[in-house]
Image: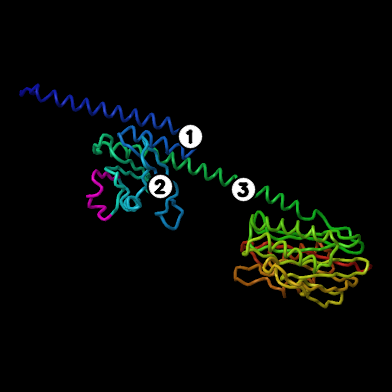
Amino acid sequence: MATQNPRQTVPSLEDENQRLKRAVEELSILNDLARAIGASVNSEEIMRTIIHRSLRAIGAEQGVITLVDRDADDSMKTLLRTSVSSGEREQYHFNQNLLGWMHINKKPLMINDPTHDDRFSGVRWDATVRSLVCVPLMIKSQLRGVLTVYNKKDHGQFTEEDQRLLAIIAGQSAQVVENARLYEAEQALLKVREELRLASTIQNDLLPKGSPPVLGYDIAGRSVPAQAVGGDYFDFIPVREPRYAICLGDVSGKGLPASLLMATLQATLRGQTILDVPPSLCVQRSNRLLFQSTSSDKFVTLFVGILDPVTHTLSYTNAGHESPFLLRANGECVRLTTGGVVLSILEDFPYQEETVHFGPGDILVIYSDGITEAINPDERAYGEQLLNDLLLEARNDTAAGIIERIIASVNSHAGPAPQMDDMTIVVVKRSMEG
């Protein structure tokens, strides 16, 4: 039996001891990292911890984590970048060529001589970048980010062991970073939803709570926003007893910006109507104020009428709004079109007004374009003719009943198609005995 040379055994044992020592150190590094990042849900804090531990583990001067946006049309888009330096050094900008290489190869990359690396010929590196190791952050075979460390300390070179350890750190950390990102996105979404809920509550508080008590008239209004908050507006504003201003407006756009402009419109109109001025002057002044306080891409369509239940007249101005229906008791339909252009486009515009008479049983229906422009799955709009036909059928209903029938008819027409615009209706009906 051959005996082993003791001189050969000693180096072998030393190599094994070094390997075991290195493995223990790596396990200690990974365990410490897991404890450090496991309890946090702050993605920025987690990434900084990962970079700090990575620099210490492989003796690098600077590190960067770059996250990519998986939902962006351009997969090369950077979602977030976090960098840490072991000293007072200029922070490097992550090279897009590295990100492109990672998207294609999805495996660790080590470069100890960037300017002469054939894989990146023609790429201009920062003059102080001597070496780097770049490893992917992978989630279910998808690239979610890249961890890069630069410049081995003491002007050394990175080793295969450095690359292997950094790859293990990235593999262990990727899901933790992703979970923190998802948690933060969820919290941001919840915050937005709460803000929208509060905005919707405030907006609903701005709308009338009930119908104005006008003797001999049945008046109702309703607004159904397409989103949590809308840009449609209606109001019943007491002018000088027993008269009321009846308003319905439609702000361009949707969502929170439109609702803010709607609130501005309401405040402006209330400030003008309380002065007991004719509707044309009220709209002219409101237009000037909105022009001076809103951006050029915003505009408002508006109908303002002053109802006098003593003379049974409605003096009105229509600023580019859908022409209301005045349905006479005998079935004749009159459209109220007199007025002018939409608000906030021209600073000064001489709006016209007209006065119409309310006979017993006459019905005024003011609406926003969300009614007539509602689209069904065949892309056919509800249209004015369907609305006119429905009004003839529903003329004996109450004002609130007419509104409910209009909304139900529009919803039936649209079917499963989502509501694309706010729907707002005001109905003014004079009693037959009035």
Percent position of residue 253, x then y: 63, 62
Tell me, yes or no, whether the two marked residues, 2 and 3, touch with CB atoms within 8 Å: no
Label 2, on which residue?
144
Percent position of residue 171, x then y: 36, 40
- Asked whether residue 19 appears in the rendered view, the answer is yes
113 in the magenta segment = yes
Q: Amino acid at mark 3?
A: Arg
- Asked whether residue 321 appears in the rendered view, the answer is no
Q: Nearer the viewer, residue 408 or 250?
A: 250
Q: Nearer the viewer, residue 305 or 114?
A: 114
Q: Amino acid at mark 2?
A: Arg
Q: In this view, which residue lies farthest toward the left?
A: 1
Q: Secondary structure at mark 2?
A: strand
Question: Where 238 falls versus 174 (above or below)?
Answer: below
In three-dimensional space, the C-alpha distance between marks 2 and 1, rounded to whole angstroms, equals 19 Å
Label 1, on which residue?
40
Q: Amino acid at mark 1?
A: Ser
Q: Going 65% across and 71% down the picture, which residue do you hit?
A: 381
Q: Which residues are magenta?
A: 108-122
Q: Secondary structure at mark 3?
A: helix
Label 3, on which residue?
193
In three-dimensional space, the C-alpha distance between marks 1 and 3, rounded to whole angstroms, equals 24 Å
Q: Residue 337 sits in which quadrant?
A: bottom right
Q: Secondary structure at mark 1?
A: loop
Q: Looking at the figure, which quarter contains the N terminus?
A: top left
Q: Going 63% across and 68% down the picture, which residue do you hit?
A: 375
Mark 2 Cα shell of 10 Å, populated few (<14), some (14-19), many (≥20): many
Dot 2 or dot 1, earlier in sequence: 1
Percent position of residue 208, x then y: 79, 55
